Image (cartoon, rainbow, N blue to C red):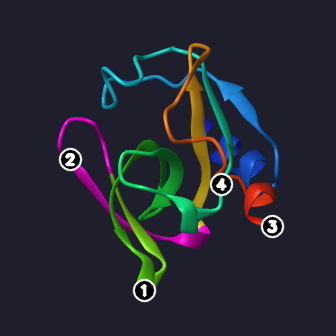
Amino acid sequence: MGMLDGVAGRVAGGATVEFRPTGSSMVPLIRSRQQVVVAPVDPSKLETGDIVLARVAGTVYLHLVSALDPARRRVQISNNRGRVNGWTGHDRVFGICTSVDGVARPGAAGKSPAASGR
């Protein structure tokens, strides 16, 4: 179980989590070891370009929403370098990145379950 699995469990339980992911797949949006904040999300409010914490084919990623399929309640997850990880259901989207190194992510506000009345 990787570090992101633990973060996903905490976010799925309702916590907002700060951590420093490693890797280069999201550069320049997120650089390795930058502090990110991930909060629970209402997946029905997601838009392309949102950065989410989601499980795709057994692996947890902090990657972009690259396409939406509201009828089937799923989103497509991709990195910022053109690689598509795949489609995943709303039940496997745990949270949304609300800030990177203290800078708020555009469009992330108002997408939490509390904001939707869920």
**Residue at mark 3:** 117
Query: Mark 1 or mark 3: which is in front?
Result: 3
* Structural distance between the alpha carbons of marks 1 and 3: 21 Å
Kind of residue sitting beneath label 2: Arg
Which secondary structure, mark 1?
helix
Mark nearer the N terminus (2 vs 3): 2
Residue under the image location 31 percent in, 20 percent down: 28
Kind of residue sitting beneath label 1: Ala
* Structural distance between the alpha carbons of marks 2 and 1: 24 Å
Which secondary structure, mark 4?
loop
Looking at the picture, tell me which residue is in the foreground, 89 or 114: 114
Mark nearer the N terminus (3 vs 4): 4
**Residue at mark 4:** 41
Occupied quadrant, residue 41: bottom right
Viewport quadrant of the C terminus: bottom right
Magenta region: 78-91
Labelled disc at residue 110: none
Occupied quadrant, residue 94: bottom right
